Image (spheres, grey):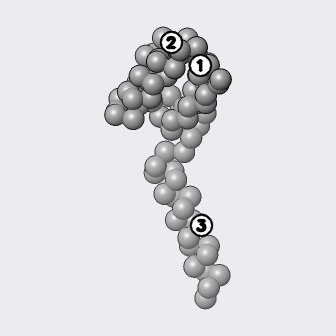
Amino acid sequence: MRVLMTLDGIDVGGTETHVLSLAEEMINKGIGIVIISRGGSLLQSFSRLQCPIYQVPFPTLFQFQRIYRRSYVKKSNKLS
């Protein structure tokens, strides 16, 4: 079995440390893990798992809000 774990960032936080623990246990049970993330301060801890880690440029919350607002403004202009 292979599992893809996707996190927008791997900075210190509850979700990230939980995923790190899950990934470690799954690897110990012979499950193949691949991680996709923007990177972050826990990257070195995840690297110790010796599973593939791919860094992709997920948008930050600020970037996502800008994209959403632009989309909303376009929709609003169509209604008038």
Q: Position of residue 20 (x, y in %)?
A: 44, 23
Q: Is residue 58 visible?
A: yes
Kind of element beneath mark 3: helix
Query: Residue 60, percent across and down?
Result: 49, 45
In this rendering, would 63 be left or right of 17?
right
Out of 34 and 71, give the one closest to the viewer: 34
Percent position (x, y) of residue 31? 59, 19
- Kindly identify which residue carries mark 2: 28
The answer to whether mark 2 and mark 1 are in CB contact below 8 A is: no
Residue 45, given in percent of the width and then of the height, sits at: 43, 16
Q: Is residue 10 above or below residue 29?
A: below
Which three-letter amino acid code belongs to the residue tagged 3? Ser
Q: Depth check: give the residue in front, 56 or 51.
A: 51
User: Which residue is found at the position 59% from the left and 37% from the top?
Assistant: 57
Residue 4: quarter of image: top right
Q: Quadrant of residue 21?
A: top left
Can you say which quadrant of the picture contains the C terminus? bottom right
Per the image, the residue denoted by label 3 is 71
* Upstream in sequence: badge 2 or badge 3: 2
Secondary structure of the residue carrying tag 1 is: loop
Question: Dot 2 lies on which element?
Answer: helix
Amino acid at dot 1: Ile
Given the current orientation, which residue lies at the most extreme bottom position? Answer: 80
Q: Residue at x 54, y 45 (%)?
A: 59
Assess whether mark 3 and mark 2 are in contact (beta carbons under 8 angstroms).
Answer: no
Task: Give the Cα separation between the discs numbered 2 and 1.
Answer: 7 Å
Given residues 35 and 39, the one toward you in this image is 35
- Residue 66 position (above or below residue 28): below
- Please name the residue shown 47% across and 34% down the image: 9
Query: Residue under circle 1?
Result: 31
Q: What's the distance in space between the residues labelled 1 and 3, CA to CA?
A: 40 Å
